[in-house]
Image (cartoon, rainbow, N blue to C red):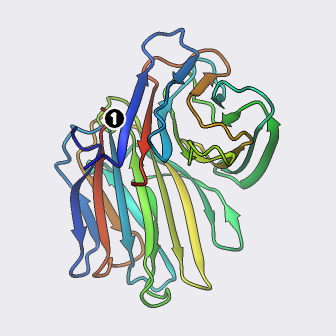
Amino acid sequence: MPETYEPIATTQVSLSTISQVTFGSIPQTYTDLRIIGVSGQQTAGSISVRLNSNATSLYSNTRLEGDGTSATSAQSSGQGQWRIFLNSTGNTISVFSDINIFDYTNTSTFTTAFYNEYKNSKLVASVCLFRNTSAITNVTLDAESDYFVPGSRFTLYGIKAA
Amino acid sequence: MANTYELISSNVLSSSAASVTFSSIPATFTDLVVRWSARSDAADVNDYFALTINGATTGYSLTNLTGDGSVPGSTTLSSTSLRAYGCAGGNATANTFGSGELYIPYYSGSRAKIMSNFGANETDGAAFLGLVANNHSSTAVTSSITLTILTGPNIVSGSSFYLYGIKNT
């Protein structure tokens, strides 16, 4: 019986000069994608998430945030990327990100995703849109400040609906 | 090819219990997922779990994000346990159980563990949902997980808990 939930690729950052993680040549044989990441940046910063290396203003995001004091909501539109907003604490691996990209091979619809981000002192839940109907063949994650902390790890899984 | 997402253990309560424990968890997976459907006998619409790892009572902190259909909130807590949402209380609509998931990535790695919980309880007129960023400073491999009802005193019969392992190769 074919696997329903399969690991496609894992990247573990081994050097201190890696600022980008790329999942390329994504097979078009699944229904949804999921990226599980545990990461940090050497200088605190967000992670940009881009699809098909597209950096044009086609990304939007609505999110719910909790910082231990208050719950807030915000929205970003016309962006050149989605963003994992939580900054790691110092030079440590302290952010857990769970990115779910739905129906990524569908060329009739824009691409939607939801992802949650967790760290010790804050969490964010986001729903996202990429206003392009191309099938998703690669996903890049860029450390916006400088470099990923060695030991940061991202795994791409494929989920089949049949 | 070996299964990526495997059931390690299940516990469907045939009688009330104050807690559920998954122990002797093999260290052969990459991530752990616990999923449940639960109800307690608390004199309340909602209940929650205290979550402990490897029986530890120190090194825990968390931040949550909650909503009850009226008021959103977020708090931070350092305690002798973590928190997991997703349990209906004894005053919830009959036959209603809450649902929840706990995700522990890279549970066998030698660093502090950050784990997520999403849980919800919707009872047609009263609701609660919550996300939690749970942090355990211990660098030990996660070998046991215990969910203890916070208000209770018990989790009722019919509540079900499932532990899954996910492999990234």
In the rendered image of this protein, does residue B71 appear above or below residue A100?
below
Q: What residue type is labelled 1?
A: Asn
Report whether residue B114 is seen. no
Q: In this view, does A63 lie to the left or right of A92?
A: right
Query: A162 or A53: nearer the eye?
Result: A162
Q: Residue at x 37, y 57 (%)?
A: B51
Relative image position of residue A76 (x, y in whole percent): 80, 42
For this view, does B17 lie left or right of residue A161? left
Q: Give the residue at mark 1.
A: B168
From the viewer's side, name the closer residue of A158 and B44.
A158
Residue B108's x, y, as percent? 29, 35
Can residue B25 be seen from the camera position used here?
A: yes
Residue lying farthest left? B24
The spot of residue A16 in percent (x, y) is 50, 10
Residue A82: where, in percent of width, then height? 69, 36
B87 relative to B64 in the view: left or right: left
**Tag 1, which secondary structure?**
loop
